[in-house]
Amino acid sequence: MQHTIGAMNTPPVGPPATLLERIRTKITSGELEPGNPLSEVSLAQEFDVSRTPIREVLKQLQLEGLIEIRPKVGTFIREPTRREIVELFQLKEVLEGLAAALMARRGSCPELDQLEAIVSASEVSSNAGDTDTYAAQVQDFHQTLVNGADNTKLVEQYERLMNQLAYFRLVRRTLEHPGRAVTSSAEHRHILTVIKDKDPFEAETAMRAHVFASTQELLVPRTRTTLSLEREEPADDGGHED
Amino acid sequence: MQHTIGAMNTPPVGPPATLLERIRTKITSGELEPGNPLSEVSLAQEFDVSRTPIREVLKQLQLEGLIEIRPKVGTFIREPTRREIVELFQLKEVLEGLAAALMARRGSCPELDQLEAIVSASEVSSNAGDTDTYAAQVQDFHQTLVNGADNTKLVEQYERLMNQLAYFRLVRRTLEHPGRAVTSSAEHRHILTVIKDKDPFEAETAMRAHVFASTQELLVPRTRTTLSLEREEPADDGGHED
DNA sequence: TGACCGCCTGATGCATGCAACATACGATCG
DNA sequence: CGATCGTATGTTGCATGCATCAGGCGGTCA
């Protein structure tokens, strides 16, 4: 599970992180509020470097979609529009679907064992109602699955996507729906089963259905405890009519 | 079809292109050979700016995967490994599949009419054996389809993917297979039909099959005119067994 | 002759300074 | 009193200079 790739959002060790990673983390961790201005001089002082490397990093983060540089005005943390969030989740669905299919084709691998451990542990925590633990395990499940696809380009695109979503802010909300945890856990178990069965098609289908369901939980404002997928927003939400 | 987004690889007008776009184009257009060193001072002189903006651009291009910056040594045009190419094509398949599904769900839109025009024109050129014209139309078909998905994030990821592939270099080879053009053209027509029928599932399925077939033509060295998908490389090539 | 060691050149890495511009505020005029 | 214009400030945009280091080349020694 260790990554030697340069651009990671969760470096295993602390200090020896790239400037890019450190500033990115400052944004994705929610330390800064969206819309907040990011002065080059402030960052330069904070990280004890000059403006030059800061500017290089900011340009890259703009390319990643995390910030917006308004020329001659300033740099601001970007707040994804709802439309963009929907778009990103549509991508998330197919990317994770691909990951599941690739893992199913791949067969035995370290990540498969990790998935087994994660799913087993998450079944315990979900039944126990330990939301915090389960939330972390959900993250692990998806990340491990993408890693298990053995496709570095997929991992890169997925990382960028999750960074743009500031996913950390969203996951917690999902699990506020009572009963979602156990349902989600069951879906994880099913996905793992079909992957073990080396059924790429079913793995992809199940994964996409799972991601779609989780997405719905996130995008639909939590108004009632059990919701039956009624739509209360005219905007396209990536519905499954296939 | 016009894009006002900052990072595009094919700006509609010439001169007022960003420095990033201009340098990126220098790479993706094949003007530079892979492995070729990209000196900061050379680029600075060529574009009549100082090294500072050049460095910012190079850092961004590194993030895009187009170049490799070896610290204290130099910057080099990156040559994707064959494995990376396979990985990128796996992504291309699902991204274009998503695009087709989204277009099918969307219904009438300008891009749909454009697709109709492109497919009709390409049927003519493919039957006439006009390879050059057909190659351009193939590009148009795929680009228009992705644009028609009405998902800006998908467009962005797709652009990056195509840049990494240096797709321009590869497409031409595909059409060297005699008969591929007419087959491909027929697939395009079928895809357009199911999109018009608003059948997202079939659209995605057809699109993925088409991309996969085209990919095979690209990845399998052209040894015989009609090949029946036999594999001559042990490496995983993203096979469809679902 | 062969291997090793030190310099030398080229590159990048970064700090700094100046110029240009967008924005906000306050004074002035109708 | 309201609108407008000028200025003041804070920001980014870019050029330049120096420090640092990797890699190559030649000389020297065994």
Image: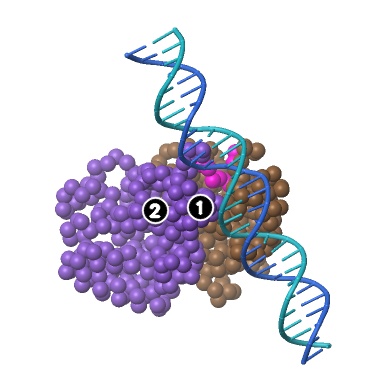
Chain colours: A purple, B brown, C cyan, D blue
Please give the name of the residue rendered at 59% of the width and 67% of the height, measured from the top-left corner. B81
**1 or 2: tag closer to the N-terminus:** 2
Identity, as a three-letter code, of the amino acid under mark 1: Ile
Query: Residue, x 23% and y 47% (percent of image)?
Result: A221
Please provide percent x and percent y for residue B175: 64, 56
Residue displayed at 40% across by 77% down: A110
Q: What stretch is highlighted in magenta?
A: B5-12
Q: Which amino acid does label 2 sit on?
A: Ile
The part of the image, by quadrant, that contains residue A106 is bottom left
Is residue B41 covered in magenta?
no
> Can see residue B200?
no
Q: What is the spatial separation of the Cα atoms under label 1 and label 2, in whole angstroms?
A: 14 Å
In this orientation, which residue lies closer to the viewer: A7 or A219?
A: A7
| Residue nearest the viewer, comparing A26 with B218 | A26
- The picture places residue B241, in percent across and down from the top left corner, at 44, 69
Q: In which quarter of the image is the C terminus of chain B?
A: bottom left
User: What number is the disc on residue A54?
Assistant: 1
Q: Where residue B124 sits: x, y (%)?
A: 62, 44
Q: Where is residue A69 in the image (x, y as percent from the top left)?
A: 48, 43
Residue that numbered label 2 is attached to: A27
The disc placed on residue A232 is none
Quarter holding residue A46: bottom left
Prevalent SS, magenta region: loop
Q: Is residue B214 rendered to the left or right of residue C23?
A: right
